[in-house]
Amino acid sequence: QMPLVESGGGLVQAGGSLTLSCRPSGRTMGLGAVGWYRQAPGKRRALVGDINSAGQTHYVEPVEGRFTISRDNAKSTAYLQMNSLKPEDTAVYYCNTGGTWTSEGYVQGDYWGQGTQVTVSS
């Protein structure tokens, strides 16, 4: 069983929106800083953005202004809201926790989810 569970992926037309969720799979694990990653076919897994426990975020340039990361600490859940989706956003999206968040960025931790597929049609 993976430590994290992602949900919310699916098929959407270009210009559409999806919201992904990420939560611990068990009750004993909290959710600290979270990084959202994606892996497109034939490409390496890459950071999309991240959020610390206080809600501060970073985003990579290709998604800046279109994607929003948030969290609900009471629910131990992090969200990735994706707007104005493009076909190049098609990928498996993963969340990660257990890493280190600084003002410079996020260094991934050891805990991953199984990933959720996002497909954007043109």
Image (spheres, grey):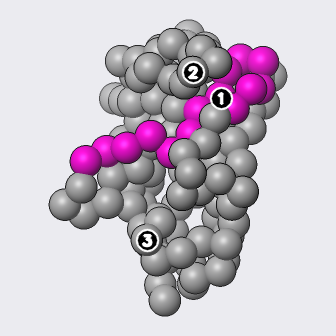
In the rendered view, does 86 fall on the left or right side of 53?
Answer: left
Q: Which residue is mark 3?
A: 88
In the rendered view, does 93 fall on the left or right side of 50?
Answer: left
Q: Please provide the residue range marked out in magenta.
A: 44-57
In the rendered view, does 42 fall on the left or right side of 104?
Answer: left
* Residue 29 seen in render: yes
Is 98 part of what is drawn in magenta? no
Q: Which residue is mark 1?
A: 51
Q: CA distance from mark 3 to mark 1?
A: 23 Å
Label 2–label 3 contact, CB within 8 A:
no
Q: CA distance from mark 2 to mark 1?
A: 12 Å
Q: Which residue is mark 2?
A: 104
Q: Nearer the viewer, mark 2 or mark 1?
A: 2
Q: State which tag comes first along the sequence, 3 or 1.
A: 1
Q: Amino acid at mark 2?
A: Glu
**Residue at point 54%, 24% (across, down):** 105
Label 1 sits on a secondary structure element that is strand
**Residue at point 39%, 61% (across, down):** 91
